[in-house]
Image: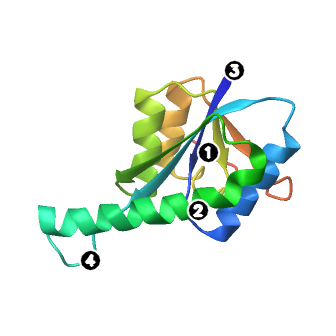
Amino acid sequence: MKTALFVTDCSIDSALSLRNGLSAHARQPLRLTVVYPYDIPGGQSLSRDTLKPARTEALTQLKSWSGLLDTIGTDWLTTETLLASPELAISIHLLIRGYDYWLVDDWSQVANPALAAVLNQGSTRTRPLSIAQTPVLMTA
């Protein structure tokens, strides 16, 4: 079974994009890891008092968001939260875990030079979730 990474912002659009993208490739089952990167409120220092409510809120949002995916058969779905920026979360996961695909619903992430360098190191392939999207050409 192939593995895939999807980093979400827990928006309805990202849930619909993922659900539609997976439905289009239903013949190929995936072991999917969904990561929701979150942060503490701006201007606050990192402490137990600021981290705990931010993490609780992130877990609640991710659980609610994953409920929108119920029609895709989530037997092989793993959800995680990570205190990080989206770019850092993607980099961390692609560097420490082996994925066959990185599912993308926002091509601007692919244009990020740091992420491009991470993608070039491994065998992970980028798969757009929408046919209507046009990849950004990158030059070295």
* Image location of residue 87, percent across then percent down: 45, 52
Distance of label 4 from label 2 (alpha carbons): 23 Å
Above/below status of 76 relative to 134: above
Give the labeled residue for mark 1: 139
| Image coords of residue 71 (percent x, y) | 78, 51
Q: Cα distance, mark 4 to mark 1? A: 34 Å
Q: Are marks 3 and 2 in contact (CB under 8 Å)?
A: no
- Which one is in front, 56 or 14? 56
As helix, strand or loop, the secondary structure at mark 3 comes to loop
For this rendering, which residue is in front, 77 or 5? Answer: 77
Q: Amino acid at mark 1?
A: Thr
Please state which amino acid type lies under the numbered disc 2: Trp
Say which label, 4 or 1, has the lower sequence index: 4
How far is the residue under mark 1 from the one under mark 2?
Answer: 35 Å
Residue topped by disc 4: 42
Q: Nearer the viewer, mark 1 or mark 2?
A: 2
Residue at the spot of label 2: 65
Q: Nearer the viewer, mark 4 or mark 3?
A: 3
Q: Tell me the amino acid under the disc marked 4.
A: Gly
